[in-house]
Amino acid sequence: MTEAIHTAALVKTFGPTRALDGLDLAVQTGEVHGFLGPNGAGKSTTLRILLGLLRADSGAVRLLGGDPWRDTAALHRRLAYVPGDVTLWPGLTGGEVIDLLGRLRGGLDTRRRAELLERFDLDPSKKGRSYSKGNRQKVALIAALASDVELLLLDEPTSGLDPLMEEVFRQVIREEQQRDGRTVLLSSHILAEVEALCDRVTIIREGRAVETGTLAGLRHLTRTSIQADLAGPATGLAALPGVHDLRTHNGTVRFDVDTAALDAVLRQLTTAGVRSLTSQPPTLEELFLRHYDRSPNGAGRRPEVAR
Amino acid sequence: MNALTGTRTLARLALRLDRVRLTAWILGLSVMPMGTAANYFQLYPTEQELRAVSGVLTNPSLVALSGPLFDLSIGGLTAWKIGVTEFILVALMSMLTVVRHTRTEEETGRLELLGATVIGRYAPLTAALLVTTLANVTIGVLAALGLTATGLPAAGSVAFGLATALVGTLFAAVAAAAAQVTGSARAATGITGAVLGGTYLLRAVGDTGPTWLTWLSPIGWGLHVRPYGGERWWVAALFLVTAAAFTTAGYALAGRRDVGAGLLAERPGPVAAAPGLRSSFALAWRLHRGLLLGWTLGLAATGAVMGGAAAGIADLTSPNQQLSDVLARMGGRAGFTDAFLGAIFGITGMVAAAYTVQATLRLRHEESSGRVEALLATRVGRVRWAAGHLVFALLGTALLLTVAGVAGGIAYGAQIGDVGGQVGRLLGAALVQLPATWVLAGLGTALLGLAPRLSSLAWAALIACVLITELGALFGLSQWLLDVTPFAHVPKLPGAAFTVTPVLWLTAVAVALGAAGLAGLRRRDMPVT
Ligand SMILES: Nc1ncnc2c1ncn2[C@@H]1O[C@H](COP(=O)(O)OP(=O)(O)OP(=O)(O)O)[C@@H](O)[C@H]1O
Ligand SMILES: [Mg+2]
């Protein structure tokens, strides 16, 4: 399998701000790749570098086998982009913008255009200045999806869409997935969307990739939270690898445990004598929130404990 | 919560956002009259000396440009020399400030952000008007104090300050109404700018012929307050009544429309793009055509009015010995009219350059609004994108000057019975300004490519050109500074002979600046917001 996107040790600074700080990102051809991270993590910056709009300070970038900064025009023929903030020309109608962007990209499929207009329920006769945020988003989405390209770069494409439209978007992306060789890089804050659509995800934080892999693989990185009433003192529990945020209160222990260490921890508990046990299964959401938490030692804490 | 809640917060915010801009305007506009008076005091320490040159200073061609001289004194001369410039600039300041804090804020959605909190329906408009009026009053007071400090009579100085503040306040009111009628900041600025241009032309025609036309023009009113020339305080009432009318209209309209909308309802447009809309040039044409059309009409009117006025210039001669001598030296009547036409087209060049700058900075507007991002993600390259807009800056200006020259030629030629000859001569006088306007387009491009956040300095450069041209000699600026403005190098057609060297030089400078800007644009990050 070839890589549609590959970056290595990518650095981009804006004055004192280090927006990207050694980012490694690999997107396989044909996959839908989720790109997650808190506000200001550097997602939009990465996408703009991939488009050749920004120039990286250092590091390597390959996009569809080319250099996005040098081979801009040739690469842009093969990709479509939905910016994070969609602004339209106030005097042009949505239909005109869709056609214009499609033609400038090298042509668009009119049947598909009509179909998408229908599915996204967009009135193409309105002027840019009178569209709502969600409808502006739809204009950009339709313009991108109606052209036949190899790579879609989508920067929070569903922000502003209502739940119904969000569902339409998911269907359309799933259809894209069926078609051979279509690659999608999807930046998003909506975990459900990423879980529903993506083959693999990369989580970035402060300009660096902190997790990357398949969703199944990431689930292994999640933690189970355990609360147990113990007969005796919980000696040795704190020393076990994979135990986090251990708190003891009147013989009740609460802690989080890495999924991989679960077995050893349960053994240790039973030696102390378990009277009752509740466990909360791991969710991706927690993993995700853990990476979003920005408190100084946030990356190691569970959000509900950090409260 | 009432309709004015939050006015104070918004006004403070506006003052904070505009602190540099407004300070620059206020300082500039209050120092300029004082400086003019001080320089006249130095040049003509005695009444005798003043009388000796008065004929030259107040020759009729200048009356068309600056209005009549009401009193032959340093004060009268100062008010006459600086009046029109001061009034136009203060009107521009007011227009830009009001539109920025009403329409622009609304367009960018910032107002909506505030509107959801504690902002009353009329608060933005009220805050914008308050801030602008405050600026106008400050300018008026400082100008009056400055003029008095140079030793001029207090009454005249107060009258001049008052007239300045009133012109500014009136145009703030006009802009307030325009901002409510239209759907965009650009349109609001366009309408108010057109009103301003129209009032200048009305006054120019009125002062060289049918006087009643002057009385339709607020700039005419400003002059007819007659600072230092038997002040007519009652003229202030004209301003107040008109300003009140426009303000009332603004508030009435603001009460009727939705945030973000214009008064005129949006009509649905085409559901698909016309076949021609398939290149960045085609897009640029869509974005520029309205502006270009407006400017074309404006410059056609300017050319026609000024050409028409030229025919009457030579008849206006006062029975003044010095002036007759000057006339004789200038080659009699014809030479004199040619000098007038030369001055007119010099000014027309700078007016057209305002379009040049506007069209060039459209690039910056496309970038900072974020629209360029989607565009540059297609096959359109940066240089091609920029070229689409620069074509309008360069060739659009050529069109404007052509129209002004032809209209002037027809109007002047018709009166002296030589349309064929005059159209060619005045077309030349207009088009010879073109390379100088291109230098400003080059400067705008250079700023865009190399220091995008400073792009609006291209406007500052144009204002500097106007002021140096208008006041440079009087202020005794050194030659190199006078030579900085590209317009100083333009051959003074139709009177003077055409020389090709300065034209080539100006073009070369424009090309060099433009090339540097495009090179910077290819290299830098996009978009810089
Ligand atoms: N043009 C710029 N000039 C200065 N700083 C910038 C610029 N663009 C981005 N930054 C900074 O770089 C960092 C990364 O921003 P970026 O827009 O890539 O974040 P993001 O992950 O897309 O965030 P969000 O989820 O809010 O969209 C932020 O700290 C931002 O302030
Ligand atoms: Mg972003």
Image: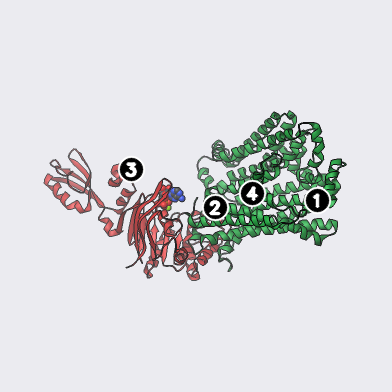
Chain colours: A red, B green
- Observer-nearest of A168 and B301: B301
Subunit ID for the residue under disc 1 = B
The answer for how far apart the CA atoms under marks 2 and 4 are is 22 Å
Task: Classify B42 as above or below B205.
Answer: above
Q: Are marks 3 and 1 on the same chain?
A: no
Q: Which residue is mark 4?
A: B189
Q: Which mark is residue A295?
A: 3
Whether labels 2 and 3 share one chain: no
Q: Quadrant of the N terminus of chain B?
A: top right
Q: Which of the two marks, 4 or 1, is nearer to us in this view?
A: 1
Where on the picture, by quarter, is residue B283? bottom right
Categorize mark 2 by other alpha carbons within 10 Å: few (<14), some (14-19), many (20+): many
Q: Amino acid at mark 2?
A: Leu
Is A102 positioned to the left or the right of B102 in the image? left
- Is residue A39 among the parts visible in the rendering? no
A115, above or below B455, in the image? below
**Disc 2 and disc 1: Cα gap in Å?**
40 Å
> Is residue A241 among the parts visible in the rendering?
yes
Q: Which residue is mark 1?
A: B309
In the picture of the structure, the residue carrying the numbered disc 2 is B448
